[in-house]
Every structure is written in structure tokens, then in C-alpha cells.
């Protein structure tokens, strides 16, 4: 989903191999209209959008599986409907495609996976709106899709390729001039088809997620920090997964996985819990033979929705209706002296039928029970005050399957010297007179 029409709204484009066309759904004030169709020969299999001809506006590059090429549809000025395509030789049976600036010249280049020759073709922009002849790099057998990310932290886009017949992922590190190192190989399950990159464990390095068609699983491969990857973790999904998409579907700040299951007629949603861990899948029916899924706010309610394309060229749209946990009361700010107990309380309601988890935070850092702290994972927090170390901002966070919400902040003010009644930094006669005054009125 990209803003193809330049109106600030997300549009949808799908490549349709059976009908030899690309369908465009251009979002507007009234929502999605019927699709506009662009003829694209060669059994189009995948597409990518970007400023590919050096001119403003998003162009489309589409792989032609049976024509061994890429068709670049350039968008004319003031229109989202691309013109007749230019043809680029991409190698035998191109399937997947990505766009990135591989040689750091400020222009988008293309990389294409070639199912027929176990290679990846890299086509560098030539600076005049076209592309140089392809450079071929060897990968595993029968690669269907590829993704790009910075795997070794050098600021350059690298490549990862899912090898369908080999059951592996090939990783090619960018050498800095648009060429790549020989590929490293990692096990990825039986018949890996879809692949994507994202930082799943929050360490600032791009990891991999791969959908394995024959296994009915998604594998995540966590970056070891140097451009290599740890052994895969396996997460069950539905029958014959075709692709994997990353997004924060429950708005909790943690990435989730969404997978279309071709034989099951469903999409699987795997909610991330942080650290590269995912909860068991939740499946949603979407109709026959889903092949790809995108994440975006279709109804503009602030919650990410799912757009699923099918083999027959139809779209299924799943509007996000997840309820969220909510506070019914918030903690109140208090002042205490050393040796007193500070108590904060909240009340909350979870989404129906879902467990609720509470965690207290001080100055943004998660708290744990200890000698002076009790209830850090409950609705009632107790802190035995030991001085200014306990002063600060306290808040509770509620987590459920549908996300995380925060309470309003509450403050703890700690007075290290309770005898200093007038808070002038000294204990003197004025404080004694204040004390006697309070005592006389019954408020010692």
C-alpha cells in the first residue's frame, strides 16, 4: 500500500498473473473505488512502487514471469495511472522484486529473484531515468521472493532470498558499490516462499521472517549482530502460507506478523510480545486462495486494517475491530517522607475474555518487587520510601492480546527533612513556631 495518487491516502496495487494486468484501487474521500486496470504482459507476479525514473511521482516496476523481464510503468504528471511500460531484461522467470539504493548514488535501483536460474539480478539506475544491464548473483535453487535490509549495520541495503526448492535463505551483503558478496545460506524450512525483514527483537538490526509453504510455518531468523543469523525459530500458521508481512496490528509498539494461507482461505496473525517472540496464531477467514496481505488504516480510525489479495484477483478487507484494555481509575500524586509507605492504585477492565497484565513503571523503567517494593505486577503498588531515590513519576501499563495502554502519570514528592516545615533549607525557631501553630489547631 502506497500513496500512488499523491493525495495523502494509501492506494492498493496488485499484480495479476492470470489476467496479465495490474489493478489499482486509488483511495479518495469516498473510500476505495472500483479498480483501474493496467495491461502488463508476461504473467506479472510481483511489483514494487518508487520514484524509478528520476521524476516526481511513484512509478511501478512489475516482474513478468513468462517474459523474463521487468515492466516499468512511469506515472505521468498529475496522475496515478502509469503510462505504457518500458521493458528491462531481468533473467529467466523473474518472480520477486525490491527497490533500494544499492550503490548509494541517491537513485533507486532494482533487484529481482530469478526462479529459472537460481540467481538474483541487480539493475542499477543509470541516472537518466533508465537502468543499466543486469548483474547476476548466484543464490539457492528456485528462488521465489526476496527482501532488502541492512543486516551488518553499515548503512547499505543487503539482500535476502527465499529458495523454494533448496529450503534455505540466501543472504548477500552489499559491498558498497552495488555489488554483493557471495551468498551465505541458512535453513528456512520446507519450500520457503515469502520473506520479509524487520527488527523483531529491538536491537537495531534487521532480522528475517520466512513463510514455508509445505510446513505451514513461519520461521524467524534473528540477526547475530554482524550480518549473520541465528538458527531459525518456528511459528505454526495455516495451510500453504504464501507470504509474510510485518506491522503493528494492535498498536502496542511491538511488531506482529501477518500471513496469508493459500489452502486454508485464511490469514494468520501472530502478535509480537517483544524480544523476537510471538504469541500463537489467530486465524481469520478471507476467502479462497489468498496470496498476499498488506497492512494499512483503510477506514481511517487509527487502527491498522488488513488488505488481502487472492489468486483470482479479488481483495478482502478486514477492518480492525480489536477492543483495548482501559483504565477506569488512575493513580494519584502523593508526598511522603523517609520511612512512610507510598501507595498507588488503579482499576482497569480487560477486553472480554482476555487476560490482563499490569506492570508499574518508574520514570519509564519497569519495576520489580523487592525489599521495599510490593505489587509491581498488580493494580496496587506499595513503595516504602527511602529518600529521593524513590521520588519521580509512576505509571501503570495494561497489556492484553489487543495491545498496551498507559495510565495517567502520578508523582511522588519526597521530603528528606520533615522538621523543615517552611521548606527554607534549615530547621530553626520558625519551624518550631509553625509546628506549635499546627499542634494548637489539632494538626500536628
Image: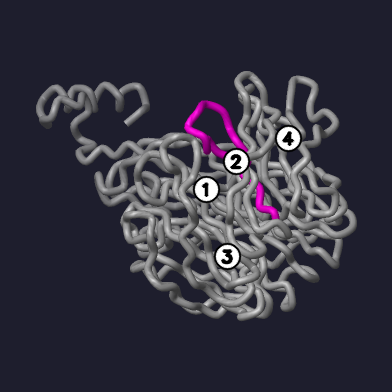
Task: Report the residue at 69% width, 47% height from top.
Answer: 294
User: How far apart are labels 3 and 4 at the CA level?
Assistant: 25 Å
Highlighted magenta segment, given as a residue range: 49-64
Rendering coords of residue 416 (x, y %): 22, 41
- Residue labelled with disc 1: 99
Q: Residue 68's quadrant in the figure?
A: bottom right
- Residue labelled with disc 2: 49
Rendering coords of residue 123 (x, y %): 49, 52
- Left or right side of 59 for 440: left
User: Which of pointers 1 and 2 lies earlier in the amino acid sequence?
Assistant: 2
Rendering coords of residue 90 (x, y %): 58, 57
Q: Secondary structure at mark 1?
A: strand
- Residue labelled with disc 4: 298
User: How far apart are labels 4 and 2 at the CA level?
Assistant: 19 Å
| Label 3 crowd bin: few (<14), some (14–19), many (20+), radius 10 Å | many
User: How far apart are labels 3 and 1 at the CA level?
Assistant: 19 Å
| Label 4 crowd bin: few (<14), some (14–19), many (20+), radius 10 Å | many
Give above or below for 289 relative to 221.
Answer: above
* Closer to viewer: mark 4 or mark 2: 2
Whether pointer 4 and pointer 1 mark residues with C-beta atoms closer than 8 Å, the reply is no
Q: Secondary structure at mark 4?
A: loop
User: Which of pointers 4 and 1 lies earlier in the amino acid sequence?
Assistant: 1
Residue 51 in the magenta stretch? The answer is: yes
Task: Report the residue at 14% width, 22% height from top.
Answer: 430
Residue in the foreground of this view, choosing between 235 and 135: 135
Q: Residue 255's quadrant in the figure?
A: bottom right
Give above or below for 335 relative to 269.
Answer: above
Looking at the rendered structure, the number of numbered marks drawn on it comes to 4
- Left or right side of 3 for 149: left
| Label 2 crowd bin: few (<14), some (14–19), many (20+), radius 10 Å | many
Amino acid at each position: 500500500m502506497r500513496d500512488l495518487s499523491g493525495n495523502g491516502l494509501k492506494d492498493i496495487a496488485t499484480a495479476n498473473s492470470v489476467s496479465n494486468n495490474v489493478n489499482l484501487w486509488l483511495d479518495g474521500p469516498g473510500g476505495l473505488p472500483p479498480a483501474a486496470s493496467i495491461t502488463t504482459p508476461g504473467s506479472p507476479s510481483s511489483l514494487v512502487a518508487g520514484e524509478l525514473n528520476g521524476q516526481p511521482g511513484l512509478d511501478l516496476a512489475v516482474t513478468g514471469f513468462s517474459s523474463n523481464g521487468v515492466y516499468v510503468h512511469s506515472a505521468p504528471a498529475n496522475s496515478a495511472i502509469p503510462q505504457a511500460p518500458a521493458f528491462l531484461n531481468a533473467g529467466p522467470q523473474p518472480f520477486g522484486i525490491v527497490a533500494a539504493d544499492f550503490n548509494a548514488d541517491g537513485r533507486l535501483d532494482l533487484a529481482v529473484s530469478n526462479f529459472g536460474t537460481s540467481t538474483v539480478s541487480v539493475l542499477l539506475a543509470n541516472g537518466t531515468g533508465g537502468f543499466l544491464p543486469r548483474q547476476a548473483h548466484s543464490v539457492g535453487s528456485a528462488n521465489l521472493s526476496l527482501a532488502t535490509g541492512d543486516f551488518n549495520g553499515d548503512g547499505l541495503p543487503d539482500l535476502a532470498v527465499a529458495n523454494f526448492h533448496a529450503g534455505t535463505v540466501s543472504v548477500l551483503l552489499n559491498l558498497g558499490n552495488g555489488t554483493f558478496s557471495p551468498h551465505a545460506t541458512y535453513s528456512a524450512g520446507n519450500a520457503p516462499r515469502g520473506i520479509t525483514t524487520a527488527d523483531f527483537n529491538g536491537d537495531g538490526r534487521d532480522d528475517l521472517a520466512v513463510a514455508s509453504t509445505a510446513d505451514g510455518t513461519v520461521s524467524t531468523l534473528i540477526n547475530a549482530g554482524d550480518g549473520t543469523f541465528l538458527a531459525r525459530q518456528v511459528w505454526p500458521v495455516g495451510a500453504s502460507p504464501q507470504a509474510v508481512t510485518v506491522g503493528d496490528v494492535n498498536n502496542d509498539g511491538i511488531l506482529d506478523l501477518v500471513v496469508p494461507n493459500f489452502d486454508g482461505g485464511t490469514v494468520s496473525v501472530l502478535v509480537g510480545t517483544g524480544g523476537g517472540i510471538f504469541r500463537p496464531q489467530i486465524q481469520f477467514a478471507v476467502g479462497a486462495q489468498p496470496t498476499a496481505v498488506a497492512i494499512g488504516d483503510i477506514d481511517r480510525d487509527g487502527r491498522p486494517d488488513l488488505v488481502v489479495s487472492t489468486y483470482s484477483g479479488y481483495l478482502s478487507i478486514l477492518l480492525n475491530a480489536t477492543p483495548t484494555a482501559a483504565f477506569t481509575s488512575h493513580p494519584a500524586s502523593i508526598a511522603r517522607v523517609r520511612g512512610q509507605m507510598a501507595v498507588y492504585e488503579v482499576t482497569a477492565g480487560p477486553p472480554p475474555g482476555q487476560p490482563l497484565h499490569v506492570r508499574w513503571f518508574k520514570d519509564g523503567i519497569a519495576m520489580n518487587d523487592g525489599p521495599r517494593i510490593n505489587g509491581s505486577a498488580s493494580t496496587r503498588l506499595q513503595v516504602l520510601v527511602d529518600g529521593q531515590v524513590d521520588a519521580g513519576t509512576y505509571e501503570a501499563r495494561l497489556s492484553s492480546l489487543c495491545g498496551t495502554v498507559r495510565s495517567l502519570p502520578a508523582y511522588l514528592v519526597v521530603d528528606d527533612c520533615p522538621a523543615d516545615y517552611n521548606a527554607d533549607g534549615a530547621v530553626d525557631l520558625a519551624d518550631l513556631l509553625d509546628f506549635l501553630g499546627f499542634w494548637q489547631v489539632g494538626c500536628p
